[in-house]
Image: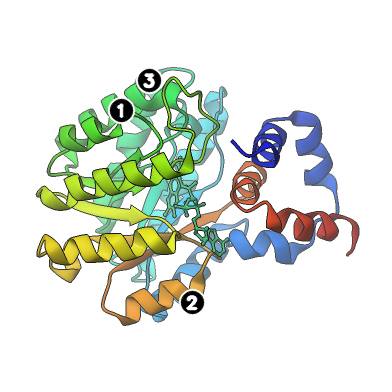
Amino acid sequence: MNPLRTLILAAAGNDAVRRAVATAPVSRDVVRRFVAGETVASAVDATADLVEHGLRVTLDYLGEDTSDRTVAERTVRAYLALLDQLHETGLACDAEVSVKLSAVGQALDERLALDNASRICAAAEQCGTTVTLDMEDHTTTDSTLRVLAEVRRAWPATGAVLQAYLRRTLEDCHALEGARVRLCKGAYAEPASVAFSDPHEVDLNYVRCANALLAGSGYPMFATHDPRLVEIVAERARWHDRAPDSFEFQMLYGIRPAEQARLAAEGHVVRVYVPFGEQWYGYLMRRLAERPAAVAFFLRSLVSR
Ligand code: FAD
């Protein structure tokens, strides 16, 4: 892995760095480029704007890895309030939510995470929308897939996420035949024993997995900003005779917005992953790690305000 990427990912988990950045006069503009805001209202505003421009949305209330039941409960309530607002504003048909199980208690107790995820899925169904369970580092993959399987018994439209950098993922694609599956490259620092470290190998596995998902009967969601992969997926979708509404592209808020608009104008379904909430630090650091060129810009913003 690129040494700068490793360093930034280490900083993402370092409390001293976290405190320094969180208390520094970070330019609002830098954070706002990737994060919709800290409140439900700001998330709903960003959603309305994207929907007006022909895009769909999945909303992520930022926060992960909690070992505190109160924090997990606060996260569930934030999702319930968000779903309520999406319903009230008529946005629920174009916007779903993405949930990290570690934010709703997975590290404490898998059963608690299942119960909390189920509460969010039930509320989403009542509001006329769905949930996707984000995938985190490889130590949580089996647990997340177990919870997903349970949740899908009652809410079969609940989406899964699979990461192309994991060696196991092609098998998981087959195991999830018929499901809504988001395919991404994967964002965590993983050991070579479980993950491909060569970016070319990750891309090859992405294409293998994309083919498997497009050949199946599920609803694949291709989450990537990589122009080559977008082109290959679009071509493979045509080859598999996929109708435009039988799969979608997904990109992150603030990343390649012109490409999001271009794909939507071409008739593709495009969904934007919109993070919001006060816990923006870890998310922002992962985005910077993917794009080290942006780090200089970010560091400048820490000192100049
Ligand atoms: P990269 O290899 O990072 O980038 C490939 C190319 O894309 C670059 O060379 C460049 O041409 C272009 N590009 C990338 N970033 C930019 C930029 N900022 N500006 C301009 N061009 C750019 N990961 C998880 O582990 N779990 C999840 O649940 C998860 N959910 C996700 C949901 C969505 C909707 C998306 C889009 C990503 C998600 N990710 C998740 C993150 C993902 O795994 C990758 O870390 C991230 O998307 C970067 O990979 P990439 O495919 O864009 O390719």
Q: Quadrant of residue 263?
A: bottom left
- Viewer-nearest of discs 2 and 3: 2
Instruction: Indicate left or right for 218 with 33 as reference.
Output: left
Query: Nearest the camera: 81 or 289?
Result: 289
| Residue 95 appears in view | no
Q: Secondary structure at mark 2?
A: helix
Q: What's the amino acid at mark 1?
A: Arg
**C-alpha distance separating marks 1 and 3:** 22 Å
Disc 1 is placed on an element classified as loop
Identify residue for label 3.
110
Q: Position of residue 303 (x, y in %)?
A: 90, 57
Q: Are marks 1 and 2 in contact (CB under 8 Å)?
A: no
At x 28%, y 69%, the residue is: 269
Q: Which mark is residue 49?
A: none
Q: Mark 2 near mark 3, Cβ–Cβ under 8 Å?
A: no
Category of crowding for the residue at label 3, using alpha-carbon neighbours closer than 10 angstroms: few (below 14), some (14–19), many (at least 20): some
Quadrant where the N terminus lies?
A: top right
Which residue type carries mark 2? Ala
Percent across and percent down for residue 305 are 88, 65
Q: Quadrant of residue 3?
A: top right
Whole-number angstrom distance, CA of label 1 to CA of label 2: 33 Å
Q: Nearer the viewer, mark 1 or mark 2?
A: 1
**Tag 3 or tag 1, which sits nearer the N-term?**
3
- Indicate if the residue with disc 3 has its beta carbon within 8 Å of ligand 1: no
Give the SS element for disc 3.
Answer: helix
Task: Name which of mark 1 and mark 2 comes first in the sequence.
Answer: 1
Circle number at residue 258: 2
Identified by mark 3, the residue type is Glu
How many other residues sit within 10 Å of disc 1, few (<14), some (14-19) or many (≥20)?
few
Seen from the viewer's position, the closer of residues 290 and 54 is 290
Q: Is residue 163 left or right of residue 274?
A: left
Which residue lies under the disc numbered 1?
168
